[in-house]
Amino acid sequence: MHPEELAASVGRLFERSPAFPGESLAVDLIANPRAGGFVRPKHSKRHKADLAALEKMAAVLPERAAPASLRLHLTERSAHAADIARGIVESARLEKDERRHIIITAGGDGTSLETATALVELPVAERGRFSILRLPMGTGNDGSEGRDLKVCLSRVLGPMVNEPRRAIRILPNPAGGKEPLWSFNIVSIGVDAFVCRMTNRLKRIFPGDSFKFWVDVSSVFYDKIWPPEKLKLKAYDAAGREVVSFEEVFLLCAMGVSGRRQYGSNKSILPDDDNVCEVAQMSLFKKLAFKDLIASGRHRGLDLVRLFSATRLRMDYPRSILLQSEGEVTELQASDFPLEFQLTDPLYNVLSPR
């Protein structure tokens, strides 16, 4: 399926959308034409069927009284989605465009991450006019508004509201020279970031989802490539009180904007209301025994696994390690520590059913 086909279909849905009645809508669709939802025949076929069903549902609705226009933007390189989103926002501000702006992403988690990053940069007074809707057109889609295109877009055919969402600010030690980063789903350091790096590399050659394969490989080889060291971690609640403190050799530490979140294509690393998971170093036998339990969200109560809630993590680590945010991987050096993950107040809006 081509992005132009998706854009044409989405445009027809908005022509009959009852969302925000009486308001003019400016809809911008940012699409990655190389995303799995476009280039993989199996996914394309399913998406075309979903769009046909949605258009059939829309056909019985009256046309909007207020206009809704749609523009398609195609990404061409890494970080292009962020540049496009910033351009959309800046144009609206310079032209004093008072319409309600809806930015739709059609790509993987990287496209969603880049676009949301641009929206959190908005001044507080401007945020109410902009919202995001993230379609599951990649291979992972952990950051989208669901894993089913029909479910995501069906909200366009009913009343909608802006739902304010929180984010995680990732703050490396300024002495290391790295800029702060954002996460809108889960950020983590350790073995899972290595799995993401290898998955991304293989994806460039063989499109598809190889996350499960690299989880199995990493159980055996990660320690040899990235020998784990002691992580010193302190966790704090919203009032600034210390809630957890430890120092131990670890495999991964993940923090979500909330509990009940997944990454790595539906892996439930945060299976309940707690938003932090830390897994200590363990023997190869335990890795092989635990990996499927952790991937399926059944790791509450396992020894060497911590699940707890926090709004800020401060971590010290003596050597280089990989960090992932929405599947995008950054290599940290010892100089990037202490490293902090900070859960923010609501910063951006997601288009949600009323």
Image (cartoon, helix red, strand yellow):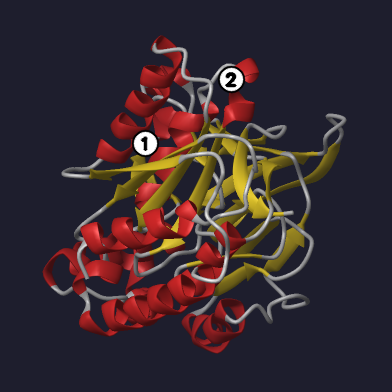
Can you say which quadrant of the picture contains the C terminus?
bottom right
Q: Would you call the spot at circle 2 few (<14 residues within 10 Å), some (14-19), or many (20 or more)? A: few
With respect to residue 171, does 4 lie above or below?
below
Query: How many marks overall?
Result: 2
Q: Position of residue 200 (x, y in %)?
A: 26, 62
With respect to residue 302, does 61 lie above or below?
above
Front residue of this view, candidates 293 and 141:
141
Whether residue 147 appears in this view of the structure is no
Q: Residue at x 31, y 56 (%)?
A: 7
Q: Residue at x 38, y 54 (%)?
A: 11
Q: Which mark is residue 333?
A: 1
Element type at marker 1?
A: loop
Q: Position of residue 153 (x, y in %)?
A: 51, 63
Q: Would you call the spot at circle 1 few (<14 residues within 10 Å), some (14-19), or many (20 or more)? A: some
Find disc 2 in the rendering and name its residue.
126
Q: Position of residue 285 (x, y in %)?
A: 51, 87
Can you say which quadrant of the picture contains the N terminus?
bottom left
Element type at marker 2?
A: helix
Q: Residue at x 58, y 28 (%)?
A: 129
Distance in Å between CA atoms under marks 1 and 2: 36 Å
Q: Position of residue 69 (x, y in %)?
A: 39, 41
Q: Amino acid at mark 1?
A: Gln
Front residue of this view, candidates 176 and 1:
1
Residue reaching furthest left?
205
Q: Residue at x 29, y 83 (%)?
A: 45
Q: Amino acid at mark 2?
A: Glu
Front residue of this view, candidates 225 and 260:
260
Q: Nearer the viewer, mark 1 or mark 2?
A: 2
- Give the mark nearer the N terminus: 1 vs 2: 2
